[in-house]
Image (cartoon, helix red, strand yellow):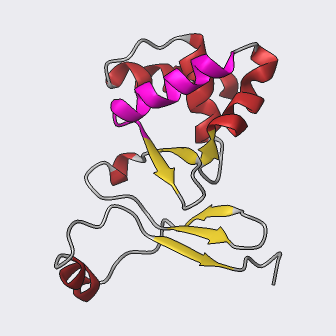
Amino acid sequence: MNQDTTARSWARQTIQAVGLRATAARVATLLVLRDSSAPRTHAEVSACLAEYEIDKATVFRNLNDMVTANLLRRSELGDHVWRFEIIAEEEQAHTSHPHFVCVDCGTVSCMQEIELTNKSKTASRRFGQVTEILLRGHCRDCV
């Protein structure tokens, strides 16, 4: 079985496991996000799928269906644009990981290795439940 077939098989099984139909458009959408190193906007995912003639409305519906099924996470990082990423199996029981946004070029990076300390978790409970951590600064390319 070649890598492309293996990837499509993984995507179909993953989508079906959350109770959704594994349509060709959903499989393609999930693979775009799997192969991305950072969250992607609807426009970015749509651009990647344009060659397969998957329209923007279908991409948008599929992204939101997979968010509802807890397969994807949707984040808004302060610029009023939703970004989507796969929720890794090990993250299913945890809140999302932090993101870094470059204030110069707008690049978004995942910071999966960063966690709140126990002291920070305890202090943050005074305000409610932390659902997202966003760090802003200047990326290495812009410094």
- Kindly indicate the quadrant of the structure image that contains residue 16: top left
> Would residue 109 be found to the left or right of residue 95 on screen?
right
- Pinpoint residue 55: horizontal percent, then vertical percent: 69, 16
- Residue 7 shows in the view: no
**Which SS does the magenta portion mostly show?**
helix
Residue 40 highlighted magenta (yes or no):
no
Query: Outermost residue toward the bottom?
Result: 119
Q: Quadrant of the N terminus?
A: top right
Residue, x 60% and y 27% (percent of image)?
29
- Residue 116 shows in the view: yes
Q: Nearer the viewer, residue 122 or 78?
A: 78
- Pinpoint residue 100: horizontal percent, then vertical percent: 59, 70
- Magenta span of residues: 55-72
> Would residue 32 be found to the left or right of residue 129 on screen?
right
Residue 66 highlighted magenta (yes or no):
yes
Q: Nearer the viewer, residue 114 or 103?
A: 103
